Amino acid sequence: MLTIATDIDALARFGRALADPLRCRVLLLLREAPAHPADLAAALGVSRTRLSNHLACLRDCGLVVAVPVGRRVRYELADARLGHALDDLRSAVLAVRTEASCPDAADKGCC
């Protein structure tokens, strides 16, 4: 059963999805056009198993949907407006310090 997420829940889900660079790359590819997992894996240079885990996360976050096409499944953004949101986020100017803001940045790949 699908439910409508609250504003805060929707933002948290979006943030969780964007927290991983590979999921960001998947979303940007799906922003261009729907795709099958094998095609996404090839375009991203990752295994289908690794991609499958990320697609499951994106589905759980409500950002992508799996559409059956015969015996295959095609993935697409759950709402076309997500593509516009991704464009807006990509064009936003971020105010970040040039030095890492947390002491574990080098180890964790954050900040």
Image (tube, grey):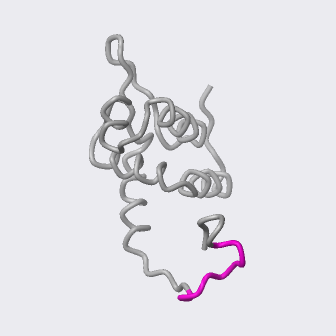
Q: Say which of 80 and 96 sits in front.
A: 96
* Residue 94 at x, y percent in the picture: 49, 81
Q: Which residues are magenta?
A: 97-105
Quarter holding residue 71: top left
Q: Say which of 20 and 47 sits in front.
A: 47
Quarter holding residue 1: top right
Residue 110 in the image: above or below residue 58:
below
Q: Position of 63 compared to 7: left or right?
A: left
Q: Is residue 96 magenta?
A: no
Count how many numbered circles sit on residues in the image.
0
Q: Magenta: predominant secondary structure element? A: loop
Q: Position of 81 compared to 49: left or right?
A: left
Residue 66 in the image: above or below residue 69:
below
Which residue sits furthest left? Answer: 33
* Residue 39 at x, y percent in the picture: 30, 33
Determine the residue positioned at 44% across, 67% down: 89
* Residue 87 at x, y percent in the picture: 36, 63
The quadrant the C terminus occupies is: bottom right
Determine the residue positioned at 59% across, 43% down: 61
* Residue 110 at x, y percent in the picture: 61, 68
Determine the residue positioned at 37% across, 47% down: 80
Quarter holding residue 43: top left
Residue 13 in the image: above or below residue 71:
below
